[in-house]
Image: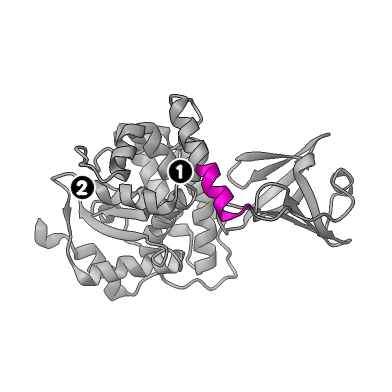
Amino acid sequence: MQRGLWFDGQVALERPVSVDGGDDGLWLTDDFGERHSVALADIVRLDGDSDRVKLGHRSIEGWRLIMVAPLDQGLIAKLPRRTGTLAPATGRMTMAVLIAICLLATLAAGMVIFAPEAIARHMPMAWERKIGMAFDLPIDAARCEDQAAQDALNAIVDRVDPDARDNGFTVELIDLDEANAAALPGGRMVVFNGLFKDIDSPDAIAGIVAHEIAHVRRRHVAAAMVRQLGVGTVVTALGGGAVASNAGGLLSLKFSRGAEAVADADAVAMLSRAGIDPRPTGAAFDGFGKQEGDWPEWLGDHPASKGRAIGFRHSYEPARAYRPTLSAAQTQALISACRALQ
């Protein structure tokens, strides 16, 4: 089986994959078992030699598949023989027109099954962020206003995704007795205080936050929002009208098992880039697996936690020197921040 590194053109994170091919396409299988196909007609061979082959996609800017020795010559023989060139990116004006057409056509079609994904792909992040900020948290979800804890949360975000806060991502600590975190549209993330009852490792919190960041960057949150809340709510928020609902619905957005697997793979890659030990995140999922019978109903769409734990544990590199996510003082500030409200 040929191994390679895959960049899907949506998120600038590499994903290790196994590559196998048929008569007219390639199958890419990541370490979580998720399979993706690409037609040979869409593949462009950018360069290659006896030790390395680099491929691009004719219509997805930034899509790359890099395979290195030992190369499977049977597989390589199926690929385009000549080095190609990629088409230039679509101009901004053309893209704006296409976005408008896609949105109008999708709305007019009455929200067919693939409409949420289509809207999510073309929705500007600024729009999504406006929607996320338009919703208030449930009335019983008090914010833990502690600057030291906020600084610790920001430090976690900065470690796993250094560009996130510059891209408008925010994180809040909420006094809810649930072992969870959630991503609202546009990169507004919330961490529940109940998480610290089961997890005392900031490395594990980093893995969970990375998972939520991945959902936003992959546009999973936007698609789930449109699917669950409906276009009417989205349009109301975009138009600046009053939004009667609160974020309670957004806190329970449902993602497909495939989306969860992708977010886990991205989180593993983020932890690796940040030099954070992935084993505590694996241990956290092991703990969640023991409690899944009592978890909220919306978690039923998630893959089994015990299986997800394996992916994080297997990414551990024994010879690598990992750095703690937070200092002892930062960790204590985070864990104790909500005590004044209790």
Q: What residue is shown at x 65% (from left), y 55% (from top)?
A: 89
Residue 56 part of the magenta segment: no
Q: Is residue 283 visible?
A: no
The amino acid beneath tag 1 is: His
Q: Are marks 1 and 2 in contact (CB under 8 Å)?
A: no
Q: Earlier in the sequence, mark 1 or mark 2?
A: 2
The relative height of residue 34 versus residue 192 in the rendered view (above or below) is above
Point out residue 314 in the picture as x, y percentages from the top left corner: 57, 54
Residue 98 part of the magenta segment: yes
Instruction: Tell me how many marks there are.
Output: 2
Q: Quadrant of residue 25?
A: top right
The amino acid beneath tag 2 is: Leu
Q: For residue 137, which numbered disc appears in the image? A: 2
Q: What residue is shown at x 56% (from left), y 49% (from top)?
A: 95
Bin the neighbour count of mark 1 within 10 Å (Cα to Cα): few under 14, some 14-19, many 20 and up. Answer: many
| Residue sitting nearer the eye, 103 or 322 | 103
Which residue in the protein does label 1 denote?
220
Q: What residue is shown at x 33% (from left), y 60% (from top)?
A: 170
Colour scheme employed for the rendering of this structure? one colour
The relative height of residue 58 versus residue 35 in the rendered view (above or below) is below
For mark 1, give the secondary structure: helix
For mark 2, give the secondary structure: loop
Q: Is residue 81 visible?
A: yes
Left or right of residue 214, residue 91 in this image: right
Q: CA distance from mark 1 to mark 2?
A: 20 Å
Point out residue 318 in the picture as x, y percentages from the top left corner: 58, 66
Magenta span: predominant SS is helix
Point out residue 17 in the picture as x, y percentages from the top left corner: 67, 49
Which residue range is magenta in the image?
A: 90-99
The relative height of residue 98 versus residue 157 in the rendered view (above or below) is above
Left or right of residue 76, residue 16 in this image: left
